[in-house]
């Protein structure tokens, strides 16, 4: 018998692991998707839907599995991801995004213990949409897929770099998104990567979808825990040359998330111009959330086994929060000691941080770098600090005020 290569053994083990992750103990687990090059005898695909047809209660559910081996931060995670329309007030569709364990209980990851709010604007998809699979040559195949009890005309985007020790990637999209408009028609994402020392798999597959009711408009939820769109935040930076401010504006339109940085913030607190913004599809943002479910991270970020940084109060605008202060010396400097001090909010869900988008909430809120001579007073080099944040939608469309 021919001996299996390391890659072949990995594929066999990974296949078993993925089946266990996605639905142990069932002949056809939830999220099971089969594909064929031939159309079925009949199709029950619904009339195409769009964001303009959104109804309160529209929902898609995905099951996910993630597995990493060979790393000190490795582990596995399975669960469910829900995207649901909770309010429709044109031109806005308000989404609730929730991640749970496989049994429907709250996810144990401390950063995923709250539902996230995302206002999506009805309108036009932004120009220069990102490719489903970035970099390199991608093959596109048209086929039929069976998922969530329905046949779908689909397109499969695939790239396989496994022969060169690269990743294997596959994405399956419904040709006509129909009721899956919330995630641009996504049916499945699969990614695997292997090396002699470790490997990783993640998968996201459609489990169910639901059409809501046209009899209610819903009430826009509070923006206490926004995923990002609909908000802004500013960072104040100081060097020996002077002070500057940077504003990050976050928006979403027609299934895509937008991010634009102003080096000189415009007057007022609105973010109306997203021309030239970086674009990320909603399903990629959801995949980023799934990837965060692998293990419970050390907070604040530090090397495993390192002691907790010191705690203290940090002033943010007119309020203060309890923060960890992590001091990191640059051991490569011999004449003087270069030190960087980063501050992280001790409680990322502190009410003071209400309305702060996820990307800023789970990052340092301040950083200062200075020289500390061996026998003298420290000399300032640079600093940055979160200086403000809030919402930029019209007050009548929000249930919380701009910060």
Image (cartoon, grey):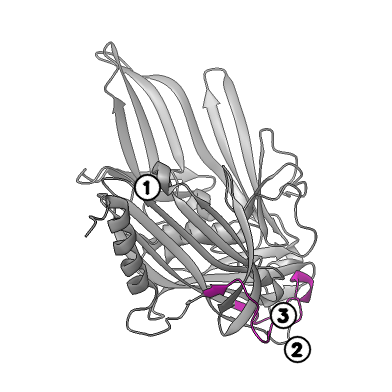
Q: In the image, is 217 to the left or to the right of 86?
A: right
Q: Nearer the viewer, residue 320 or 109?
A: 109
Q: Label 3: few (<14), some or many (≥20) within 10 Å?
A: many
Which residue is at the front of the view, 45 or 301?
45
Q: Return the disc, 1 or 2, that comes first in the chain's sequence.
A: 2
- Mark 3 lies on a secondary structure that is loop
Residue 172 screen position, x and y as percent: 58, 65
Q: Which one is in front in this view, the residue at disc 3 or the one at disc 2?
A: 3
State the residue at coordinates (76%, 61%).
394
- Residue 166 on image: x %, y %: 42, 45
Name the residue at 36% across, 64% down: 109
* Dominant secondary structure, magenta: loop
Where residue 355 sits in the image (x, y, percent)?
57, 58
Q: Which residue is mark 2?
A: 215
Q: Which mark, by number, is residue 55?
A: 3
Q: Label for residue 323?
A: 1
10 Å crowding of disc 1: few (<14), some (14-19), many (20+): many
Mark 3 → mark 2, Cα distance in angstroms: 9 Å
């Amino acid at each position: 018998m021919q001996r299996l290569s390391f890659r072949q053994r990995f594929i066999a083990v990974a296949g078993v692991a993925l089946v266990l992750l996605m639905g142990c103990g069932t002949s056809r687990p939830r999220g099971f998707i089969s594909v064929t090059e031939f159309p079925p005898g009949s199709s029950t695909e619904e009339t195409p839907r769009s964001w303009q047809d959104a109804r309160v209660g529209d929902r898609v559910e995905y099951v996910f599995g993630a597995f990493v081996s060979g790393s000190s931060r490795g582990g596995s995670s399975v669960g469910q991801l829900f995207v649901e329309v909770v309010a429709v007030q044109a031109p806005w569709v308000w989404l609730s995004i929730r991640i749970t364990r496989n049994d429907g209980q709250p996810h144990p990851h401390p950063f995923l213990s709250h539902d996230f709010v995302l206002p999506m604007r009805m309108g036009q998809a932004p120009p220069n949409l990102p490719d489903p699979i970035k970099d390199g040559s991608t093959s596109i195949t048209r086929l039929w897929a069976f998922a969530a009890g329905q046949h779908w005309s689909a397109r499969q985007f695939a790239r396989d770099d496994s022969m060169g020790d690269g990743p294997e990637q596959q994405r399956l999209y419904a040709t006509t998104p129909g009721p899956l408009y919330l995630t641009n028609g996504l049916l499945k994402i699969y990614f695997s990567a292997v090396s002699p020392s470790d490997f990783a798999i993640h998968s996201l597959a459609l489990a169910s979808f639901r059409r809501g009711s046209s009899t209610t408009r819903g009430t826009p939820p509070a923006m206490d825990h926004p995923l990002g769109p609909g908000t802004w935040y500013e960072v104040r930076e100081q060097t020996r040359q002077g002070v500057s401010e940077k504003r990050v504006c976050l928006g979403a339109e027609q299934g895509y998330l937008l991010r634009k940085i102003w080096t000189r913030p415009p007057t007022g607190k609105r973010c109306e111009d997203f021309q030239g913004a970086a674009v990320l599809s909603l399903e990629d943002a959801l995949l980023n959330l799934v990837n965060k479910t692998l293990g419970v991270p050390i907070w604040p970020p530090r090397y495993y086994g390192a002691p907790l940084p010191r705690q203290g109060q940090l002033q943010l605008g007119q309020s203060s929060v309890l923060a960890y202060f992590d001091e990191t010396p640059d051991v490569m400097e011999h004449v003087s000691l270069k030190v960087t001090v980063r501050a992280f909010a001790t409680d990322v869900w502190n009410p003071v941080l209400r309305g702060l988008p996820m990307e800023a909430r789970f990052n340092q809120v301040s950083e200062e770098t200075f020289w500390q001579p061996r026998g003298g007073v420290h000399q300032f080099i640079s600093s940055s600090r979160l200086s403000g944040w809030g919402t930029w939608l019209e007050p009548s469309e929000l249930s919380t005020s701009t910060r």
